[in-house]
Amino acid sequence: MTNLTSLLVANRGEIAVRIFRTARALGLATVAVHSDPDADALHVRDADAAVRLPGAAPADTYLRGDLIIKAALAAGADAVHPGYGFLSENADFAREVLAAGLTWIGPPPDAIEAMASKTRAKELMRTAGVPLLDPVDPATATPADLPLLLKAAAGGGGRGMRVVRDLDQLKEALDAASAEARSAFGDGEVFAEPYVERGRHVEVQILADTHGTVWALGTRDCSLQRRHQKVIEEAPAPGLPESLRETLHTAAVAAARAVSYEGAGTVEFLVTADGRPYFLEMNTRLQVEHPVTEAVFDLDLVALQLRVAEGAALPPTPPQPTGHAVEARLYAEDPAQDWRPQTGALHTLAIPGTVRVDTGFTAGDTVGIHYDPMLAKVVAHAPTRAEAVRALATALAGARIHGLTTNRELLVRSLRQPEFAAGQLDTGFYDRHLDTLTGNTPDPTPAALAAALAEASPGPDAPLATRLGGWRNVRSRPQTRRYTTAGTEVEVQYHPVNHPGIRVLATTPALVTLEIEGIRRAFHVKQNSNEIYVDSALGAHTFTRVPRFPDPQDRTEPGSLLAPMPGTVVRVAEGLTPGTPVTAGQPLLWLEAMKMEHRILAPASGTLTALHVATGQQVEFGALLAVVQEEPQS
């Protein structure tokens, strides 16, 4: 038995904070590492000690195994937990940790190596009798093989993945997937397999000790995905026949035993619409969605990882599961704008209810450009699936999140969507429903009125006339406020006391209570600089004050393409130079930010008259990238 005393987490953000929580409960000292942008991050503030990794890019910091091992030794740690992502599935790093005399909180390096390449892992699983999809050679693919799914051999998280439905697009998709895989994992190998329409992503959590015991801890469904990255996960996977559950459990245990696995891991499967399972990959680490399994089995998987690493034996069988758990990933992104990630200050993050919230942020923190835009994981557990889904949707709907656009409204609508509520899940959910789930935004007028009244209210102790807008010598003239919200300008007019169709019941700078069509509504208001945030049962709105005199410098030349976020130009379309004709919707540039690649498209057909960036160039938000002169209409 090994007796651990101090743990370094070779990671950042939410997962580092989550691991530290368990480490403290077990009496372990905690050590964080951080890049320069993360110097004041929550995981750094939360640890007993922290070591700087100079630089900002992951390649210079969280992917530098040598610096992390030096940090562990310098801080007196005797164990390293890799979390997920970064070096968590790097066999060489695991070997170097062990060679330094430290305890590795993960599976043996040989097991990691065996599963590191999806192509080699599938060969191993075929030998173990685990069902597989037959690979397709892109060089000989025919229309009968379509659609195809291209996947990076060396990593996951949606990086290096493309769906190909037209053979004419295959070469471009292969090049793009390979370039993205090389950037993310240092390995550009990409393979192809049949893309299963309306399949389900179902996985099995496994836990193995060093004494030969392997647990299969139920199933999880992770079918709701955007850009091949999970958004909503739940345990157990709903609607699976018992025979299929047993098949998945047996296959997962066989996969673990095939590589002499130890610790926590996940075996992922694709289940077709007619119930046939196929092995996808094995993640030799803790998964992002592990809290739903913890809730259902009443376990702490991180604590069990640590005990297994110390040499403890698991009981022969796991505990019995109870109830249902659902997790939603709250991202700083705009689903209606091609899932565009957001950066900036997070002024408020408050989620009510009895849900579990795992996060790497607190109010006042900044979401930067270098890392994944996930703000938090919100988990609800209840006796039934319907109750867990309802509790999670209610908590998210009542959350106050100020400063950044998020996917919160999408999550709430997804949880309340009839197909999801009925357990009819598949990976094409957002392909079919995204427009509906992001459209029909609530009328912002009542919230804008509340914002105007809150702005005009100096406080509850002021005279009534002052609280409702101040004294005016022409009482018949209404007051006017103008805001922008979600790209739309809203103008509201109100009299100091009387408002047609609306009764003002109370108003303070933070809370406005209105009676609208006979229904009493409370609007919570937070004012920050030039923005006003309004939350109510009718929805959440962010209003930006419209200046009386617009700044002429805000105008840009027609056809200007501006950077939608800070990032790095990773590609420029081949042959693109000033004077090149372009067509509407044609990809011109590829910008990488926050672990995602974004296409910059031609806004109209015409001629590229200016190109202001090159491959490898860093750009700031709003930077002028290029100009397209639209061709005149005939």
Image (cartoon, rainbow, N blue to C red):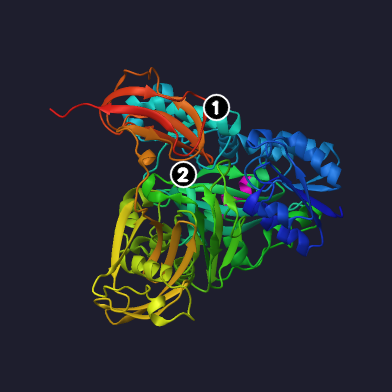
Distance CA(mark 2)–CA(mark 1): 18 Å
Image spot of residue 576 (x, y percent): 38, 20
In this picture, is 395 found above or below 203? below
Name the residue nearer the viewer: 572 or 548. 548
Residue underneath mark 2:
228
Residue that appears at 77% across and 44% down: 51
Secondary element type, mark 1? loop
Along the horizontal axis of the image, is 306 left or right of 119?
right
Asked whether disc 2 touches disc 1, contact meaning CB atoms under 8 Å apart, the reply is no
Image spot of residue 601 (x, y percent): 35, 33
Residue underneath mark 1:
188
Image spot of residue 624 (x, y percent): 42, 32
- The amino acid type of the residue labelled 1 equals Gly
* Displayed quadrant of residue 42: bottom right
Along the horizontal axis of the image, is 103 left or right of 463?
right
In this picture, is 278 found above or below 473? above
In this picture, is 236 found above or below 1? below
Secondary element type, mark 2? loop
Q: Say whether residue 573 is visible.
A: yes
Along the horizontal axis of the image, is 122 left or right of 44?
left
Residue that appears at 44% across and 31% down: 590
| Magenta region | 249-255
Q: How crowded is mark 1: few (under 14 residues within 10 Å), some or many (20 or more)?
A: many
Q: Residues within 10 Å of mark 2 (few under 14, many from 20)?
A: some
Q: Say whether residue 208 is visible.
A: no
Main SS of the magenta segment?
helix
Q: Is residue 252 magenta?
A: yes
- N-term-proximal mark, 2 vs 1: 1
The image's mark for residue 573 is none
Quadrant of the drawing holding the N terminus: bottom right
